[in-house]
Image (cartoon, grey):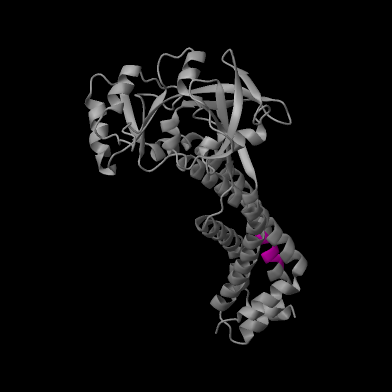
Amino acid sequence: MVIPIAYVARNLWTRRLTTALTAGGLALVVFVFATVLMLDAGLKRTLVTTGERDNVIVIRKGAENEIQSGISRDQARIIEMHPAVATGADGQRMASKETVVLISLLRRGDEKPSNVVIRGTSETGLGLRPQVKLTGGRTFTPGTSEIIVGSSIASRFDNTAIGDHLDFAQRSWTVVGTFDAGGSGFDSEVWGDVEQLMQSFRRTSYSSMVARLADPGLYESFKADIDADPRLANEMKREQLFYSDQSRALSTFINVLGLTLSIIFSIGAMIGAMITMYASVANRVGEIGTLRALGFKRRAVLGAFLLEALLLALAGGVAGLLPASLMQFASFSTVNFQTFADLSFRFILTPGIIVKTMLFAVAMGLIGGFLPAVRAARLNIVDALRAI
């Protein structure tokens, strides 16, 4: 015979206070665990959506990011004229030669400096990023000291409103527009004319090149040609893969730190669940003896107490996920370990995270409830009935 679920649920309801306290401890751990996964998912989505599926990026061999890279003008010309690069409706090659530099801006509120990426690009570069939409003002005029700022920069740094001026690289730059990049990493950048920025920063070479493939199937041959050309000391990656790689170090740090905290907290939560279940067994010895006398076998008693621990864990899981889901309305900014630049991204809750979080909660409940359940199942019928 199997002990009814309603009986198990009533026992939890009878001990409402201890049930709520134990579920609250589990909920706290679930909240930490879920927010860590959400933070990592938000970081990865931000950087993956930075790249376009049919775009490739070319940097110097051995460079880990665009800031460390360098491409000479001659190399850029060779890459731009490769047959695999698409040609636009105006007959121009769909390739953008870009320079990427770090500048320091003051954060709004605390007035502390933070590194920000400024990207020198062109009209072609803007066209290669369809996710970038102008939300205010206008785009920069080529050949001038005008810049446009991403939405994250505009909301968090001083002197980034339209009409404001930023002083760097021995020039005063006028903010003429703001743009939204759909939650991608470009939202944390400042853009201007590539040639003007190169002159100001006294650069003689570009940082990277972004190109649109004429046919996605040409990627491997294009990559092989760049690797084999003795004139080029460059390497090529798909744009999405390149920006995804930029999240690797920060993602690892977030996961290690977050999971370490989750494990430490989960041990405390499991001990709390175990104490609660042991107390439940101690207070219900006579009841357990009566169940055994009525014909319920040891495995039925074991299953009932494990089910009780499972329901307790599910309650804690749901209670932890609900506040964690509200974190989607918040954004988080930190330093990208690859570029040492400020990066803003959001918490993202996915179905996969919900499943992982609930499984984690269930595991905590079952581990914490296993030994008390075994204790209840091993009680001698005669000794248990004497406690009535």
Quadrant holding the C terminus:
bottom right
Q: Quadrant of residue 147?
A: top right
Residue 282 horizontal/vertical position (percent): 71, 69
Residue 144 horizontal/vertical position (percent): 52, 20
* Towards the viewer: 352 or 362: 352
What residue occupies the far bottom of the structure in this picture? 294
On whether residue 368 falls in the magenta region, the answer is no
Q: Which residues are magenta?
A: 273-279
Residue at 41% in and 41% down: 52
* Towards the viewer: 345 or 376: 345
On whether residue 277 falls in the magenta region, the answer is yes
Residue at 44% in and 22% down: 68
Quadrant holding the N terminus:
bottom right
Q: Quadrant of residue 270?
A: bottom right
Q: Main secondary structure of the magenta part?
A: helix
* Towards the viewer: 229 or 194: 194
Q: Where 206 falls versus 309 (above or below)?
A: above
Residue 305 horizontal/vertical position (percent): 61, 71
Residue at 32% in and 24% down: 234
Residue at 36% in and 20% down: 71
142 left or right of 227? Answer: right
Q: Count of labels shown?
A: 0
* Towards the viewer: 275 or 232: 232
What residue occupies the far front of the structure in this picture? 90
Residue 374 horizontal/vertical position (percent): 58, 68
Question: Does residue 378 show up?
Answer: no
Q: Quadrant of residue 20?
A: bottom right
Q: Where 260 falls versus 12 (above or below)?
A: above
Question: Does residue 330 show up?
Answer: yes
